[in-house]
């Protein structure tokens, strides 16, 4: 578990980059719970990733980051790293899978990042290895870097300051860095709060691992929920995340699309697929009753895909 002291130090360190995002109620009269939304869509890069990326880059020594920053990301961590590197006048090299959406690639380019596309399997091997062979620069892992986890944990501090007694916090699960960070803060300050993760059912690796008691390979089906889900829980993350998670859910993409429409209609929030996973779980009742906080992790979705979802022409 990441220490509370490391998370509190990260909050001070990233204060000039990440903003304190609001926690707002989701007004759905027939919802099974009192649902709150933590709107990380409002960050400068429209996702929570600016927190961990900035903390990791600022913690690194000048010598370590002298040749630039490198990461492997489907899009949001890439933007966080590119943002942090640009602020320090450093180059950023981003390794992306060939399935990465154009909206996220365009944002990386706007922030000055250099994109290198890789076949998904090769990109995933980089994530597993935790390094980018043949590319100079400081490699910031999108999930397992302790500084990234601590930066993500600042979300947990803010949640409990705004709502001291949540019954559950629901978190989209991709690589595990967001879950580990938030859960470390929440469990340290309010152990009774349940930590619930959500993945798309076409890549519910954590749900499978929780059932098996160890990481296991699952069938992976790419979808518009590109920021969550995977073929396997990272072996390096399993001992960190497994003690912190009370329940791991898998949600169909149709339910995620419906949640995107509800967020747009009720609170005028644009969420990407991963960002709508937690609200979809809460709206279904599978996250329980009482006060349920949903992490709306990002809003970087292709406008064409968003239009299809809003018009219900494609799920």
Image (tube, rainbow, N blue to C red):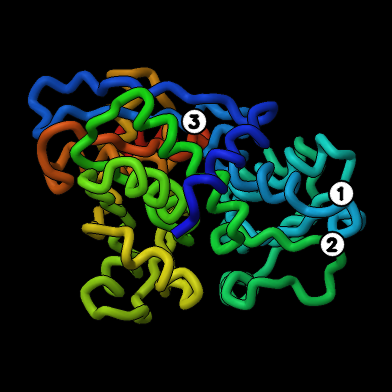
> In the displayed structure, would residue 23 be above or below residue 228?
above
Q: Which label number is shown at residue 137? A: 2
Q: Which quadrant of the figure has residue 82?
A: top right
Q: Secondary structure at mark 2?
A: loop
In the structure shown, which secondary structural element does the residue marked by tag 1 occupy?
Answer: loop
Disc 3 crowd rating (10 Å Cα; few below 14, some 14-19, many 20+) is many
Residue 45 at what x, y percent from top left? 62, 34
**Which residue is more in the foreground, 38 or 110?**
38
Which badge, 2 or 3, is on the more N-terminal residue? 3
Q: Is residue 267 above or below residue 139?
A: above
Residue under label 3: 41
Residue on which disc 1 sits? 91
Of residues 54 and 122, which is closer to you in this image?
A: 54
Q: Measure how far apart labels 1 and 3 are at the Cα level.
A: 25 Å
At horizontal 61% and vertical 61% (from top left) the residue drawn is 145
Q: CA distance from mark 1 to mark 2?
A: 9 Å
Vertical arrangement, residue 166 with respect to residue 7, above or below? above
Q: Viewer-nearest of labels 1 and 2?
A: 2
**Residue drawn at (33%, 34%) of the image:** 260
Query: How much space separates mark 2 and mark 3, taking CA atoms?
Result: 29 Å
Residue beneath the point at 41% across and 39% down: 156
Mark 1 in CB contact with mark 3 (< 8 angstroms): no
x and y percentages locating residue 315 in the rendered image = 32, 46
> Where is residue 111 shown, x and y percent of the image?
76, 37
Instruction: Name which of mark 1 and mark 3 comes first in the sequence.
Output: 3
- Residue under the point 28% across and 19% down: 266
Residue 286 visible in the displayed image: yes
Q: Indicate the position of residue 242 as horizontal and vertical percent values.
A: 33, 67
Q: Specify the quadrant that holds the N terminus.
A: bottom left
Q: Sequence-wise, which precedes: disc 1 or disc 2?
A: 1
């Amino acid at each position: 578990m990441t220490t509370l002291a490391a998370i509190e130090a990260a909050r001070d360190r990233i204060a000039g980059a990440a903003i304190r995002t609001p926690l707002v109620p989701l007004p759905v009269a027939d919802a099974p719970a009192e649902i709150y939304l933590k709107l990380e869509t409002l960050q400068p890069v429209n996702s929570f990733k600016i927190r961990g990326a900035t903390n990791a880059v600022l913690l690194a020594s000048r010598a370590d980051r002298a040749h630039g920053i490198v990461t492997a990301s489907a899009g949001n961590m890439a933007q966080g790293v590119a943002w942090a590197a640009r602020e320090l006048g450093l180059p950023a090299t981003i390794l992306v899978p060939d399935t990465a959406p154009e909206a996220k690639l365009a944002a990386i380019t706007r922030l000055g990042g250099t994109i290198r596309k890789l076949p998904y399997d090769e990109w995933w091997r980089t994530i597993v290895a935790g390094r980018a062979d043949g590319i100079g620069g400081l490699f910031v892992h999108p999930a397992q870097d302790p500084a990234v986890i601590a930066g993500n944990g600042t979300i947990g501090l803010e949640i409990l300051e705004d709502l001291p007694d949540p019954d559950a916090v629901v978190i989209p699960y991709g690589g595990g860095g967001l879950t580990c960070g938030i859960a470390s803060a929440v469990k340290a300050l309010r152990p009774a709060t349940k930590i619930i993760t959500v993945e798309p059912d076409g890549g519910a690796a954590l749900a499978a691992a929780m059932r098996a008691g160890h990481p296991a390979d699952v069938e992976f089906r790419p979808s518009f929920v590109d920021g969550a889900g995977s073929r396997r829980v990272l072996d390096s993350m399993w001992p960190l995340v497994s003690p912190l998670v009370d329940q791991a859910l898998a949600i169909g993409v149709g339910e995620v699309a419906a949640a995107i429409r509800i967020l747009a209609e009720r609170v005028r929030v644009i969420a990407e697929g991963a960002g709508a996973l937690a609200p979809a779980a809460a709206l279904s009742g599978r996250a329980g009753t009482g006060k349920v906080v949903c992490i709306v992790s990002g809003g970087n979705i292709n406008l064409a895909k968003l239009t299809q979802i809003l018009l219900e022409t494609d799920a």
